[in-house]
Amino acid sequence: MEIQRLADQIDRLITLDLSFRGVIDTLYPPARKKAGEPLAMKAAKELRRILKAKDIVFIATGWPDRPHISPEIAETDGPPGAAALGRALHRGLKVIPFFLIEENLVGPMEMVVQSAGFRVLSPRKAIAAADSPSALHAAAVLGFPAEPKRARRKAISLMNTFGPSAVIAIEKGGMNEKGIVHTSRGHDTTEHMAKIDFLMEEAIHRKVWTLGIGDGGNEIGMGNIREEIRERLPFGDKCLCPCGSGISPVTQTDLLVTATVSNWGAYGVCACLAILLRNPDILHDPEMERWILEHASQAGFIDGISGFVEPGADGLTAEVHCQIISLLKVIVERGCC
């Protein structure tokens, strides 16, 4: 079956507005127009083109949720998608994923990454594992600062030390022109958010390929469609905090993938990579999806909509997310036959 048709179906599936937020219908059309082709497939094609075995890929995620209560509270949308995409890139392209998250969320993220099949090690040991005579699938989880000056220094240090071949942000808050990160409801949530914007800026400066995945219009990468967000989304051009400049981030990425749930955007890229490499196992199965979501909840991540510590994301149950994976599997199987 023609890859373009499969890619269109994958984009349609991951942009079904099952949460009824009314946002994805605003975000997807301009992102698709800018990309010129189905978003998830374009991301997969670029990753396949750029990456080779033993390359390091940075995957940033983490959204501190209810930080006015505690910065230890973060949501389940983002970490599962990051872990699944890291798994897909490792299985399909033999890369070494480094996951970046708020410094106080490293422990919980390690649990999620391990649930995707990785042995979490220090960066140096994760790199060494790629040359192990016996199979050892390793990844690293690194803390990234929220304080801007430290974040700038950390971005330069990480790029100098590890030289990643791609930098990806999944459900990661992006700063507007005044350096403020907002919730989708227009509130300031800057203080405890890791400033991955500076890492993206450093990657772009060094001509390292970048990808943003988001669902609300306030994430890194949404700078690609900033004017549309400012014009069409609530709080797009005027937020509820004193900055008054709106939720739309300024940080752009080489490609933006929009989805109803950011995790689904990552899953769509996994599915497309599976088709391109003709290997259905690159996309995890529904059982692993449930396993990852359960570990995310056990690690203390909350559903950002319901507020419960439960294996779901964005107000949708684990069953719904598993069904999305099942449907993606149907498309992948058709593409690999």
Image (tube, grey):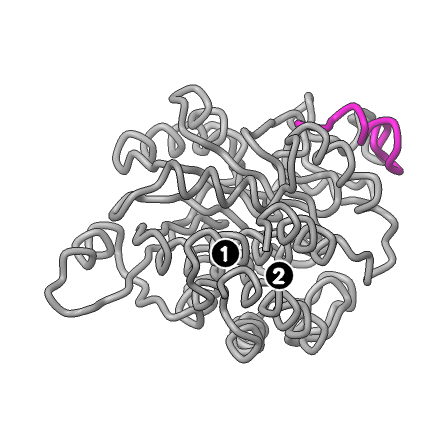
Q: Mark 2 highlights which residue?
A: 73
Q: Secondary structure at mark 2?
A: loop
Residue at point 30%, 54% (across, down): 94
Say which amino acid is labelled 2. Ile
| Quadrant housing residue 107 | bottom left
Q: Using the image as rendered, state which of residue 283 and residue 266 is in the foreground.
A: 283
Using the rendered image of the protein, determine whether residue 287 is visible from the camera's viewpoint.
yes
Is residue 241 part of the magenta span, yes or no?
Answer: no
Q: Position of residue 84 (x, y in %)?
A: 49, 61
The quadrant the N terminus occupies is bottom right
Exactly how many numbered labels are in the figure? 2
Residue 300 % position (x, y): 57, 70
Q: Could you tell me how far apart the alpha carbons at marks 2 and 1 are, in whole angstroms?
A: 36 Å
Looking at the rendered structure, the kind of residue marked 1 is: Ile
In this view, the mark in front (2 or 1): 1
Pick whichever, 312 or 179, lies toward us.
Answer: 312
In the image, taking residue 87 as reference, residue 33 lies left or right, namely right
> Answer yes or no: do the residues labelled 2 and 1 have beta carbons within 8 Å?
no
Residue topped by disc 1: 275
| Closer to the camera in the image, 181 or 129 | 129
Residue range (magenta): 224-239
Please, is residue 216 above or below residue 125 in the view? above
Q: Image quarter for residue 317?
A: bottom right
Q: Position of residue 108 (x, y in %)?
A: 48, 65
Helix, strand or loop status at disc 1 = helix
Q: Judge the density around disc 2: few (<14), some (14-19), many (≥20) Cα neighbours within 10 Å.
A: some
How busy is the neighbourhood of tag 1: few (under 14 within 10 Å), some, or many (20 plus)? many
